[in-house]
Image (spheres, helix red, strand yellow):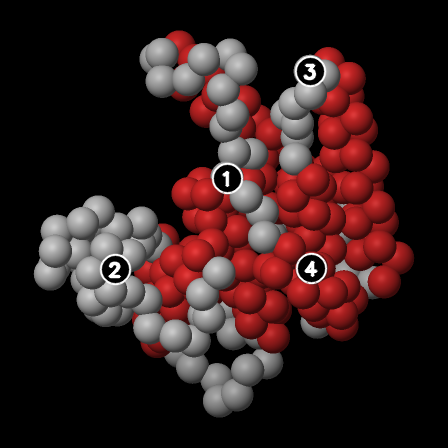
Amino acid sequence: MLAPALPAGVLLVVWTAVGWAVGLALNHVAYQIPSDLSPISAPRCPACHARIPILRLVQRRCERCGAPLEYDRIEWITAVCFLLLGVHVGQTALLLVYSFYTAVLVLTAIMDMRHRYIYSLVSYPSIAAAMVLSPTVGGLDIATTGAGVATALAIFVAFYVGGRLAYPGREPVGKGDIELAAMIGAMTGFPRVVSALFLGSFVNGFVIALLLLTGRRRRMDFVPYGPGLCLGAYAALFMSP
């Protein structure tokens, strides 16, 4: 148990606030990393180099020069995700582990959605951390965690090879998606990884079908798989190991 123990209502308020603060930090990291900038330096407008305020509403243009900004606002999404985790697992060490996993998943999803890229700078350390956390305080054992990684890799390597054969010269499934699948496998273990990848693939398929039907994408256009897979992984955290 986390100490000191808090009443359930207080815990949820506190953990929602923690999620909101973590989301503010994720906004910053998601903006800096794709631009090869230090995550600890201040985010700045690419046009006039004015500092981007940490606390903003939905304004997506620079307050000084009016240039459009690719600075996403995900603090409220993160706050809701932390709130739901607090309801699900309560004041336990598992809450810390699942919240860490959630922060990584949110960061990965927003960067892939914006930049269509899974960053090894995020995925590799997260895989290593999950391989330690899941068997120790994540409710899994080493064999279950390793099986989750192996299963995810087998599925997505097969997808990768099949995609390259079906679409020569293209990568329908990127190497970054394989890294993400391994990360999800380490976070969820076996057999939850199967549910996570199934749900993520279902979400991606639904979104792709909707984009095709509405004419916003054509059949050969690229659609990032990361956000759907991250959503499936987050949902799997609410399933029994």
Vertical relation: 75 (above or below) 94: above
Q: Are marks 3 and 4 in contact (CB under 8 Å)?
A: no
Residue 113 seen in the current view? yes
Quick one: SS at disc 1? loop
Q: Which residue is mark 2?
A: 45
Task: Point out which mark residue 116 bears.
Answer: 1
Task: Point out which mark residue 167 bears.
Answer: 3
Name the outermost residue toward the bottom: 4
Q: CA distance from mark 3 to mark 2?
A: 39 Å
Vertical relation: 73 (above or below) 3: above
- Which kind of residue does numbered mark 3 sit on? Tyr
Q: CA distance from mark 3 to mark 4?
A: 28 Å
Label 4 or label 1, whichever comes before in sequence order? 1
Viewer-side residue, 214 vs 206: 214
Q: CA distance from mark 1 to mark 2?
A: 21 Å
Name the outermost residue toward the front: 48
